[in-house]
Image (spheres, helix red, strand yellow):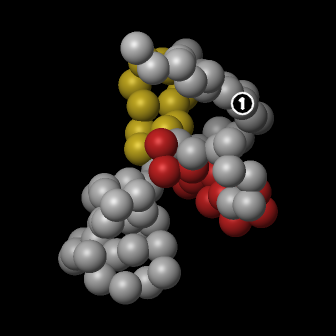
Amino acid sequence: MSTPRWIVHLPTTLTSLDEATSLTVALRNSLRHVTAIDFGEATLSEEDRQFVRTRVWCDARVGDSARCPLPADHDGPCTRPDGRSR
């Protein structure tokens, strides 16, 4: 059995998915050095519908431990975080 991971739910005053996505991108850009945060697994939900989640990034595996950093449902092939193709 693996050790359970904790999820941090961070409510905002934002009222649109685009605004929430922009905030999530800004948080990833400014906090990517914090290895305890797995931004690849970031999802968004409406306050009163938290069981309906919207994935922010593709997050497909593109190597041993790398994940695709492109937006969820992106067109074309996945890329590695360093910009190379899968």
Residue 55 occupies quadrant? top left
Report whether 45 appears left or right of 8: left
Q: Give x and y (percent) for residue 16.
A: 59, 44
Tell me the crowding category of disc 1: few under 14, some 14 to 19, or many 20 or more residues within 10 angstroms, Cα based: few
Residue at point 48%, 81% (across, down): 82
Residue at point 43%, 84% (across, down): 83
Report whether 66 appears left or right of 46: left
Q: Is residue 10 above or below residue 71?
A: above
Report whether 85 appears left or right of 43: left
Q: Is residue 1 above or below residue 71?
A: above
Q: Residue furthest left?
A: 76
Residue linked to disc 1 = 10
Amino acid type at image mark 1: Leu
Residue at point 49%, 51% (across, down): 40
Q: Does residue 67 appear anywhere in the picture? A: no
Q: Nearer the viewer, residue 52 or 40?
A: 40
Q: Give x and y (percent) for residue 81.
A: 47, 73
For label 1, the SS is loop
Looking at the rendered image, the quarter that the N terminus falls into is top left
